[in-house]
Image (cartoon, rainbow, N blue to C red):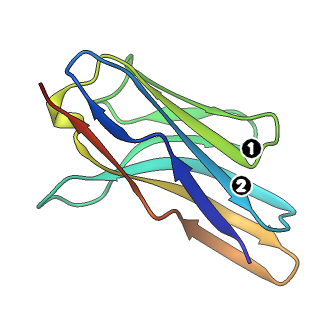
Amino acid sequence: QVQLVESGGGLVQPGGSLRLSCAASGRIFSINAMGWYRQAPGKQRELVAIITSAGSTSYADSVKGRFTISRGNAKNTVYLQMNSLKPEDTAVYYCHADDVWAPTSRGDYWGQGTQVTVSS
């Protein structure tokens, strides 16, 4: 059974930094891409950043230059370094794994979400 486990959320002041981590557990052959989405109260879930298995990255315009997505050496881990945080970055952040190949399944997976609150 594939699971995504996130960590690293919390409360931070404007201008501060946080680092989110996500690890995919279970027997996995490959993952096409991993990414981070966020959902603020009353808003739709939106893509924040994505990184492919080849290392290509893409970011939402609102976070370019402030956030950095990277994959760990284990390849089934992904990080989101968030700098210069703003109150409008407040949201629940979700890890996503795209096209996960496992011994008995193939599909997309979501983490449980981690709260990020930017406030003074």
> Residue 3 in the image: x percent, y percent?
65, 68
Q: Residue extending furthest bottom?
A: 104
Residue sitting nearer the eye, 56 or 93: 93
Residue at image point 84% right, 84% down? 104
Residue sitting nearer the eye, 102 or 32: 102
110 vs 64, left or right, is: right
Callout 1: SS: loop
Residue sitting nearer the eye, 94 or 108: 94
Q: Height in image: 33 above or below 106? A: above
Rendered-image quadrant of the C terminus: top left
Rendered-image quadrant of the N terminus: bottom right
97 vs 45, left or right, is: right
Residue 56 sits in quarter: top right
Q: Give the total number of marks visible in the rendering.
A: 2
Q: Which residue is mark 2?
A: 32
Residue at image point 25% right, 15% down? 15
Which of the two discs, 2 and 1, labels the residue nearer the N terminus? 2
Q: Amino acid at mark 1?
A: Ser
Q: Which residue is mark 1?
A: 53
Q: Height in image: 84 above or below 87? A: above
87 vs 56, left or right, is: left
